[in-house]
Image (cartoon, grey):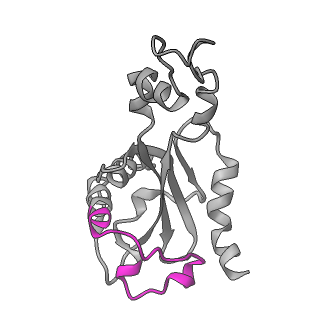
Amino acid sequence: MKTISRLLPCFGLLILMSCASNIKSKKYTDDDFKSFKTFAYLPNTAFKVDEFNAESDASIEESLIATMNDKMVEKGFTLDTNNPDLLVLLSTSNEIKSNLQNQKNNYEQAPSGGSSAGNSPNYASVSSTDYKRYFSSSEDALYNKPYKKGTLIVQVFSKASKELIWAGMAEDFKAHISDQTLMTRMINEIFNEFPI
């Protein structure tokens, strides 16, 4: 039950926002961001994550935290882990997917053999496997590769009120399975929506 109540703001963010873009953001309070001067990544401080009705994601890479720090500095904030005005929390999810699903339907019309004279040595027979191998388009080959799909949520809390004041989410971003920049691209897109 406690986990559900912690994830409720994230799900609310998903439901309340339009589906037109992969980037969504919402400001939850009327606080003026110009009144805040310092920030810190919440797990890197002495504060406890559960005090902010949130849950820490242990899988966050250091490079993603460094990118987030750079983006906050670009927005005019100063990093202060001892006494920050804003506390930032990151949550991620990655999935490995493939476009090979339902591929069987694309080849149902494949020839299953030669003509009625298929037993004759003068006629070649083509199995459905051969048909897939030799007659599928090169375009199909490009799109049938596995890919990874990611989601990143950035939550910004006020240290004084312990309230969520802004959240940004990048969802359903796709990249080649070996692409190591997926999360960095998502955080860059999220900070384009930051209210400063």
Residue appearing at x 63%, y 21% in the figure: 109
- The front one of 90 and 140 is 140
Q: Residue 77, position in %: x, y?
A: 31, 62
Q: Against 17, is 155 above or below?
A: below
Q: Which x, y percent locates residue 176?
A: 36, 44
Residue 14 percent coordinates (x, y): 64, 52
**159 relative to 26, above or below:** below
Of residues 191 and 97, the one drawn nearer to the viewer in this rendering: 97
Q: Residue at x 42, y 62 (%)?
A: 35
Magenta extent? 43-66
Q: Locate residue 34 relative to residue 4 in the image: left or right.
A: left
**What is the total number of numbered labels drawn onto the structure image?**
0
Task: Identify which residue is drawn at 32% across, 53% down.
Answer: 184
> Of 192 and 108, which appears nearest the observer?
108
* Residue 192 visible, this orientation: no
Whether 47 is among the magenta residues is yes
